[in-house]
Amino acid sequence: MPDPQSTQTIVLANLEETARFGEWLGSIAVEGDIFTLAGELGVGKTTLTQSIGLGLKVPAACYITSPTFSLLHEYPGRIPLYHMDLYRLSCDEIIELGFEDYLYGEGLSVVEWPDRLEEIMPHDRLQIEISMTSETSRTAHLSWHGRMRTRSKDFPPKSSA
Ligand SMILES: Nc1ncnc2c1ncn2[C@@H]1O[C@H](COP(=O)(O)OP(=O)(O)OP(=O)(O)O)[C@@H](O)[C@H]1O
Ligand SMILES: [Mg+2]
């Protein structure tokens, strides 16, 4: 079998496609995975995280909101979801707050504004860079780093394509 591609570009033509992509991401996540979501303000990082939550079977009663002020939200699911928004933090503050315990914890970490991690950027991660192509469409550029490389799979999955 050929090596999986370690980068991939996915067109998210509308909110529905973003939702489908997020659900797939949630369905493939395993304990200890880290998805870092990069992209400008308002591009869709939290919106994508909500669909990742669906794919992780986070109960509908636990509505996923932006952790901009609380910085980290934890949700129960098939595995726990740790949703972090590092926008307002420096790398030193992130360390002081103990966020690394979550990054290497037993759930899936979804991290908005991962550039704040600087020297503590995890080696094993799926980086998803989202960019805006129109008011309603986005492009997601995926790069699978470290041990995540072996996990890279094509979206949409072949069986349902
Ligand atoms: N195809 C799409 N995918 C994702 N979001 C979309 C899409 N089309 C429109 N949107 C809208 O873009 C907005 C994205 O907001 P969201 O809060 O998810 O961004 P964010 O990247 O988390 O912002 P911030 O940097 O402030 O945390 C939402 O209002 C969402 O409905
Ligand atoms: Mg957000």
Image (cartoon, rainbow, N blue to C red):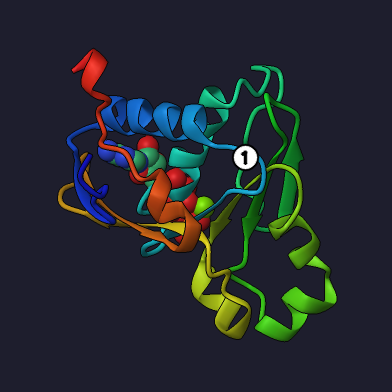
Q: Is residue 59 above or below residue 88?
A: above
Assign the N terminus to one quadrant of the image. top left
Q: What residue is rendered at 35% in x and 53% in y?
A: 43
Query: Residue 32: x and y, percent?
Result: 66, 48
Q: Is residue 70 visible?
A: no
Query: Residue 16: x and y, percent?
Result: 29, 24
Q: Is residue 149 above or below residue 119?
A: above
* Residue that label 1 marks: 65
Q: What residue is rendered at 26% in x and 34% in y?
A: 155
Q: Residue furthest front?
A: 1
Q: Is residue 62 above or below residue 110?
A: above
Q: Is residue 34 left or right of residue 132?
A: right
Q: What residue is rendered at 62% in x and 40% in y?
A: 65
Q: Is residue 146 above or below residue 137?
A: below
Q: Which of the 4 image quarters holds residue 135?
A: top left
Q: Amino acid at mark 1?
A: Thr
Assign the C terminus to one quadrant of the image. top left
Query: Residue 48: x and y, percent?
Result: 43, 40
Q: Is residue 131 visible?
A: yes
Q: Residues within 10 Å of mark 1 (few under 14, many from 20)?
A: few
Q: How many marks?
A: 1
- Picture quarter with ligand 1: top left
Query: Residue 139: x and y, percent?
Result: 21, 49
- For label 1, the SS is loop
Determine if the C-beta at disc 1 is less than 8 A from ligand 2. no
Of residue 3 and residue 39, the one placed in the foreground of this image is 3
Q: Which of the 4 image quarters holds residue 90?
A: bottom right
Q: What residue is rendered at 17% in x and 35% in y?
A: 13
